[in-house]
Image: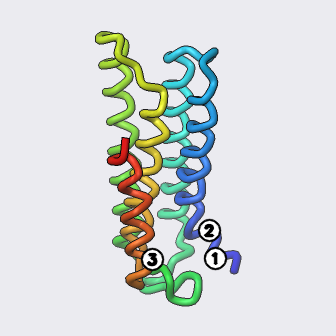
Amino acid sequence: MMLDLMVILPLVVVGAGAILMMLLAAFDSLDKERTSIVGIGLFAFAFIVQLAVTTGGTVTPFNDVFNGMLVANSFTKVAGLIIIAGGFFSSVAAQTYYVQNKGFVPEFYSLMMFAVCGMLLLTMAAELITLFIALEIMSLAIYT
């Protein structure tokens, strides 16, 4: 059970960060600099957690997680690093774009984190229902 939680810890960090960013976006008193710093910081923290899980050696070559609902192997670990790094660099690029064009949307970081959370779950999916849930989480950013 503890191994299962260690494997999905980056997914939990990104999902909790998405909910936190959604709550931060609900308040109008926060400026765009503070919101973007929190979003980029959450991506950096998620990358560090994913790196710790990747180099921790807690995953065997083929490891079923949560009774076969998810799979944790070398592909999911490396894909998680690439996906979180992509979200981080997209957020950094978006911050400079929003500063230059003055078109800041506070929900951007929350939607980006939901998309990354869905992509992480998509790489770990072992059953079709998990795959469908991952696609729905990932597509939340499209509905705006």
Q: How many residues crowd mark 2 within 10 Å: few (<14), some (14–19), many (20+)?
A: some
Q: On the image, which quarter does residue 95 sit in?
A: top left
Q: Is residue 26 left or right of residue 110?
A: right
Task: From the viewer's side, name the closer residue of 51 and 42.
Answer: 42
**Which residue lies at the image location 30% right of the left edge and 19% below the top edge?**
97
**Could you tell me which secondary element the residue under label 3 belongs to?**
helix
Quadrant of res 26: top right
Q: Position of residue 57 (x, y in %)?
A: 53, 72
Query: Residue at the spot x=36%, y=47% of the render?
Result: 143
Upstream in the sequence, badge 1 or badge 3? 1
What residue sits right under mark 3 in the picture?
A: 130
**Residue nearest the viewer, comparing 32 with 26:** 26
Of tags 3 and 2, which is closer to the observer?
A: 3
Distance Cα–Cα, label 1 vs label 3: 19 Å
Report helix, strand or loop for mark 1: helix
Marks 3 and 2 sit apart, C-alpha to C-alpha, by 19 Å
Q: Do the residues under discs 2 and 1 have CB atoms within 8 angstroms?
A: yes
Residue 6 shows which numbered tag? 2
User: Could you tell which of marks 3 and 2 lies nearer the N-terminus?
Assistant: 2
Q: Position of residue 68 (x, y in %)?
A: 51, 88
Verify CB contact (< 8 Å) between mark 3 and mark 2.
no
Taking depth in this image into account, of 47 and 102 the one nearest to the observer is 102
Instruction: Specify the farthest residue to the right.
Output: 2
Q: Is residue 57 above or below residue 26?
A: below
